[in-house]
Amino acid sequence: MKALNPMLISGREVLPLVEGGKGISATNGISSGAWAAAGGVGTVSCVNADSYDENGNVIPQIYHGRTRRERHEELVRYAIEGGITQVRRAYEMACGQGRIHINVLWEMGGAERVLRGILDRTREMVHGITCGAGMPYRLSEIAAQYKVYYHPIVSSARAFRALWKRAYRKYAEWLGSVVYEDPWRAGGHNGLSNSEDPEKPEDPYPRVLALRQQMREFGLDDTPIIMAGGVWYLRDWEDWIDNPELGPIAFQYGTRPLLTKESPIPEAWKRRLLELRKGDVKLHQFSPTGFYSSAVRNEFLKELEARSERQIAFSTLPVGELTSPLLVNRRELYVAEADRERALQWMAQGYTEAMKTPDHTLIFVTPEKQQEIRTDQADCMGCLSQCQFSNWADNEKNSTGRKADPRSFCIQKTLQDIAHDGDVENNLMFAGHGAYHFATDPFYSNGFVPTVKQLVDRILTGD
């Protein structure tokens, strides 16, 4: 196994090992500070991070506003205060070692306001910003204003080219790295394009090489590329280390740090990770963001799959194949004859409520599930810049202009729940596709849970 030499990242030579920032409260100041203290780059998730009361208890993010806009303002305040709290904890935990990055999603509601609000009050504590989930053109300008490095997350050379041409070339000195996130293997939201087949993962090497070649055209020969998604055993990537064709390469770990002593996720979540088998993580398209995402195929995902399978096309007037009448919510609609028979079977099984989708289809759910969906939609607090589930949009009308889609779910609700002792089977559980290694890697034998330092030391051996 080749030695992994220090690399210049965000203004300092550190181990080229980066902790991936994982959404709502799954990566916090303690876990990120510990990663930095071990000599790498810790990444604080600033997506609605936790704050604490005077007794050290997590402050529940409860919304009191009567309108979505009022609740959205509450969400932004929670996000800023939580982000500041976690950055300060990470900075203290790191004791001056490594680097501290913060992670935000460009498609989260109020992303720029949250980012500025955190940076305003954590000067010199934050060394870099990672950002993906969309095309964050404004990221470079904000980073330059605060004199911190920016690390955009992309899944193709084409995406980086667009970012560079439009904005990043103006602030090249603050470009700390480019994070290549494998859209088939990474956990959480993925950047699959319409031209890529979700069922056919591509070899990351040619894609990263294409990214490096594009960067070289822009004079970015020495800017690191951080490989993210599918990284578990470093020995599997030995040919990438000190490879002149690829240039400087660092490695990001998102899933493995979930199972550490410092990881803030609940014990039930950690135990569930140890039980995963190959194929248990599914790439799906139910997210209200519209992006593909990877998560454990638990009861939560299975219910979403079943909900969409109980779906038929309809019309308000007989047209084409849609000529068979079906009484739905005391109104006669028209469906295909075969679909009418299916709908009657679903209704006989208890899925008596039909909900319209933006695509002129009906899905059939139980009365309890219908009430849950409607309540979640009504309680929307605008956690995304645009939400398919509630039709919220961060614009003047606060609307996408489309009907809310009952085939999706409230992502804020479920991620807050699972991160704070919620049911691991009935909530969204993000994970990378290599999470099955927890059950097969001897390092985790007999349920062993390492400290962050033990994990980093293990990674450096190649295992």
Image (cartoon, rainbow, N blue to C red):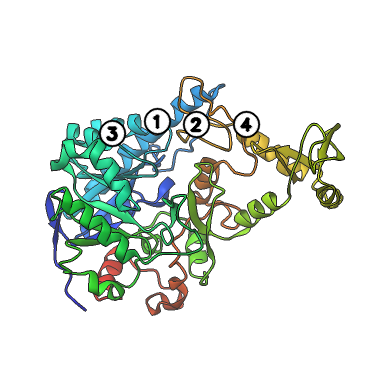
Name the residue nearer the viewer: 408 or 441: 408
The answer to whether residue 103 is left or right of residue 108 is: left
What is the spatial separation of the Cα atoms under label 1 and label 2, in whole angstroms?
9 Å
Q: Quarter-wise, where is residue 238 in the image? A: bottom left
Residue hosting label 4? 403
* Disc on the earlier residue, 1 or 2: 1
- Residue 339 in picture, x, y percent from top left: 80, 49
x then y, percent, for residue 2:
18, 76
How far is mark 3 from mark 2, CA to CA?
A: 21 Å
**What residue is shown at x 57% (from left), y 52% (from top)?**
427
Please say if the residues under marks 1 and 2 sit with CB atoms less than 8 Å apart.
yes
| Separation (CA) of disc 1 from disc 4 | 22 Å
Q: Is residue 451 above or below residue 125?
A: below
How far across and how far down the image is residue 77, in percent?
Answer: 39, 29
Mark 4 or mark 2: whose residue is earlier in sequence: 2
Label 3, label 1: how many angstroms apart (C-alpha)? 13 Å
The kind of secondary structure element at disc 3 is: loop
